[in-house]
């Protein structure tokens, strides 16, 4: 079949395509977490003592002793086998954004040749995948490529069901034989511990005596596109890179905003329910789903939970979503910008910190005292965003997210923090010295009591801010839809740890001469003088802000990954991770290398594909059209029809410029020698990306001229609107 036939057939196949038939869903109560080996399952399966030991580990992350590990492993195995599992797998999260698995059978044979099932504590806590092909940023030489995985008992094991089997999945950390982190889970656990330690200091300086472990929470909102598989199969760019490398804007785009929160198409509705049932079985609390701004775009947000588990669940959610979409005849696109000129997809990471004794520390609270603690934690975030803005930008830097950040529908690539009018005023007053305590050190003046009536959900959400306070949490809005949430969580926890350490030191000094309230205000005043420049409540999309942020406030605008990633190795960031014990300089550098390589690779693959599609799909269609046109011109001229030859001329001109641009791109794709990784990234950003755009420019104009029935690639109007 030629390209255009594939496209025309796709249109035919999906017109009025019926939803997939799925079994009636079962009640939530019946299916909730049925495939998870959680504390409740353990309490049913284990002796009292063993359960007590594992519960301690699960709740505090304490090391699991060998004897308990054996008992838990045996119970876990029996449970998994009763659910049909023959295999188990450590699941881990390498430095790429993917989820990795290494499957092993439970089976071993005994001396009589009978198959028996075996699974010991040491297999549970330690697995040994040959990780030689996982990017490690030169942390391991390939010839000594031993990487270890070990169960993270704070994240429960679960069963992965497929059409004809089940596998016990064990969430794990992944490290080198020398103990360096090779994954995204280890730094997340470490960052949480560092944040807890610093928070404890501040809370005890505030006079708290009963302080439970402070942990971070995460509630991710995931945006995605669904495209019918028939269209996807005719678009190698979508299949290989997750985005359309070509495609003219449709006559009807999203101008009317008629998709947002509109009725969900039936096929999608059936997909969502099926998908969410799978999530419920896996103990993932899917909470809201709705249409998003762009046609064909949707969102799912699970209820928030502990950051470490939330991060694992988010990975599982993405895998399950792609798989389920396939079963329903869709391609699920998690790319940040699958369609030019149409809204992209983000993943808002809602983040807060708290514990069981003081509650949510980013919630204004009901008493003046809890308000003071809130202000300190909130101040700590402000300082973090200011001091480590470039880090926050770097952890969301990918080739795909570059297409979205700074575009007019997504947060800018300048990191600032939005507080809402009320809270911003409080901090501005503190900075200006207007918020003082009464002389007797007793009741607060008007300034602080205004926070008492703080509106928890201010409603005046600023959608143009990359980092916004939303009443009892911060929402990191600039995170990319395809990303793991771990990197952003690590950055937020670690910057908070650093700020809380700074605050603890200042507070301790201030408390020597001042009462508590006055000391808090003193510290926050200094904090705001140093870091208040990161607070911004205006329009983040406006060009005035782009100018003022850089020129007046000294904030950095880092539009591409090539600009942002090198900041991972800045002195400030190296010191931050080293001092908090979250990443050693060597570990950090290896991450930089891996992320930079991913960026260059992504762009290289796209560039090759741009050239390939232009030459083998678009150009042939253009030539066919041209020959039809010239043929027609000759034969109808006799009839006296005045056939306008200007179209043919236009098409011919564009065909020439298309191929001229392709030739330029081809000349640059060849191997280059680069002085270092940064130079390679600069080349990708400054040379390759613009050339790809140049090829596209001619191709997209041709799409609007060449006869519709000849065009080989499904068009935006088809992919986005036919359901
Ligand atoms: P919106 O689109 O208005 O931002 P959503 O309801 O779509 O709101 O998503 C809000 C997300 O924030 C949900 O995942 C929710 O569970 C999460 N969330 C709510 N409170 C907290 C909190 N204290 N910490 C972290 N996440 C939270
Ligand atoms: Mg949100």
Image (cartoon, rainbow, N blue to C red):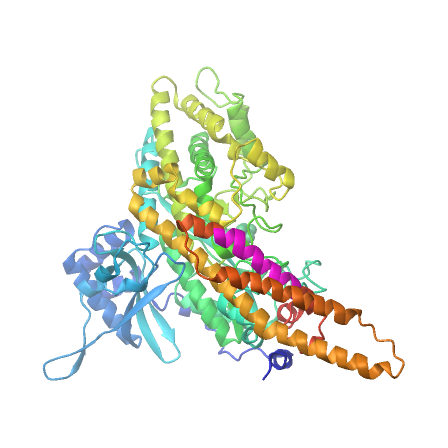
685 displayed left or right of 718: left
- Would residue 690 be counted in the magenta stretch? yes
640 displayed left or right of 360: right
Q: How many marks?
A: 0
In this view of the protein, can residue 551 be seen by the observer?
yes
Rendered position, 76 above or below 440: below
Residue that lies at the very extreme toward the right in this rendered image: 640
Nearer-the-camera pick, 467 or 586: 586
Which residue occupies 43% across, 48% down? 678
- Would residue 638 be counted in the magenta stretch? no
404 displayed left or right of 159: right
456 displayed left or right of 587: right
Residue 192 image point, x, y percent: 34, 45
The stretch in magenta equals: 683-699
Which residue occupies 38% across, 36% down? 572
In this view of the protein, can residue 146 be seen by the observer?
no
């Amino acid at each position: 079949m030629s390209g255009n036939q594939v496209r025309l057939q796709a249109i035919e196949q999906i017109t009025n395509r019926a939803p997939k038939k799925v079994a009636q869903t079962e009640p939530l109560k019946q299916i909730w977490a049925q495939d998870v080996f959680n504390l409740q399952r353990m309490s049913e399966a284990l002796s009292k003592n063993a359960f007590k030991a594992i519960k301690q580990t699960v709740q505090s992350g304490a090391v699991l002793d060998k004897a308990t590990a054996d008992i838990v492993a045996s119970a876990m195995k029996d449970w998994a086998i009763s659910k049909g599992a023959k295999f188990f797998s450590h699941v881990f999260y390498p430095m790429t954004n993917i989820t990795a698995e290494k499957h092993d059978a439970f089976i071993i044979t005994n001396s009589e040749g009978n198959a028996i099932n075996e699974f010991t504590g040491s297999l549970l806590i330690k697995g040994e995948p040959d990780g030689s092909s996982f990017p490690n940023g030169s942390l391991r030489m390939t010839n000594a490529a031993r990487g270890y995985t070990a169960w993270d008992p704070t994240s429960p094991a679960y069963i992965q069901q497929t059409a004809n089997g089940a596998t016990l999945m064990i969430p794990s950390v992944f490290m080198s034989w020398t103990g360096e982190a090779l994954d995204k889970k280890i730094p997340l656990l470490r960052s949480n511990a560092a944040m807890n330690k610093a928070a404890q200091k501040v809370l005890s300086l505030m006079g708290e005596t009963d302080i439970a472990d402070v942990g971070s929470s995460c509630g991710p909102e995931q945006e995605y596109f669904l495209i019918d598989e028939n269209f996807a199969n005719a678009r190698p760019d979508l299949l290989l890179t997750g985005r359309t490398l070509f495609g003219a804007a449709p006559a009807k785009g999203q101008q009317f905003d008629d998709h947002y929160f509109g009725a969900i198409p039936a096929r999608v509705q059936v997909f969502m329910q099926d998908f969410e049932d799978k999530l419920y079985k896996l103990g993932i609390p899917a909470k809201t789903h709705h249409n998003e701004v762009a046609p064909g775009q949707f969102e799912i947000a699970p209820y928030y939970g502990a950051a470490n588990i939330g991060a694992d669940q988010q990975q599982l959610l993405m895998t399950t979503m792609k798989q389920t979409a396939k079963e329903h005849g869709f391609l699920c696109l998690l790319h940040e910008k699958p369609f030019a000129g149409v809204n992209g997809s983000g993943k808002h990471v809602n983040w807060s910190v708290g514990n069981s004794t003081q509650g949510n520390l980013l919630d204004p609270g009901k008493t003046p005292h809890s308000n003071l603690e809130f202000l300190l934690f909130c101040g700590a975030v402000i300082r973090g965003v200011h001091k480590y803005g470039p880090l926050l930008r770097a952890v969301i830097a990918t080739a795909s997210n570059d297409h979205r950040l700074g575009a007019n529908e997504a947060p800018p690539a300048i990191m600032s923090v939005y507080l809402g009018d009320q809270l911003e005023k409080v901090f501005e007053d503190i900075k200006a010295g207007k918020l003082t305590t009464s002389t007797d050190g007793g009741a607060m003046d008007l300034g602080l009591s205004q926070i008492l009536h703080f509106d928890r959900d201010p409603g005046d959400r600023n959608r143009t801010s990359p980092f916004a306070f939303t009443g009892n949490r911060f929402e990191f809005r600039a995170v990319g839809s395809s990303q793991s949430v771990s990197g952003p969580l690590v950055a937020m926890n670690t910057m908070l740890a650093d700020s809380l350490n700074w605050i603890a030191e200042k507070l301790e000094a201030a408390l020597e001469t001042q009462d508590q309230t006055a000391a808090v205000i003193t510290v926050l005043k200094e904090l705001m003088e140093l870091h208040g420049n990161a607070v911004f409540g205006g329009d983040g999309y406006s060009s005035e802000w782009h100018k003022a942020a850089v020129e007046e406030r000294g904030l950095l605008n880092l539009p591409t990954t090539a600009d942002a990633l090198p900041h991972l190795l800045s002195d400030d960031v190296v010191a931050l991770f080293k001092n908090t014990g979250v990443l050693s300089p060597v570990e950090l550098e290896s991450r930089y290398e891996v992320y930079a390589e991913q960026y260059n690779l992504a762009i290289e693959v796209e560039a090759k594909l741009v050239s390939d599609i232009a030459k083998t799909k678009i150009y042939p269609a253009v030539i066919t059209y041209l020959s039809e046109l010239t043929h027609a011109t000759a034969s109808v001229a006799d009839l006296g029809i005045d056939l306008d030859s200007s179209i043919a001329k236009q098409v011919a001109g564009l065909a020439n410029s298309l191929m001229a641009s392709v030739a330029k791109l081809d000349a640059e794709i060849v191997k280059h020698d680069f002085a270092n990784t940064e130079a390679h990234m600069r080349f990708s950003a400054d040379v390759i990306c613009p050339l790809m755009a140049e090829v596209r420019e001619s191709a997209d104009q041709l799409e609007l001229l060449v006869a519709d029935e000849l065009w080989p690639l499904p068009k935006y109007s088809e992919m986005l609107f036919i359901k």
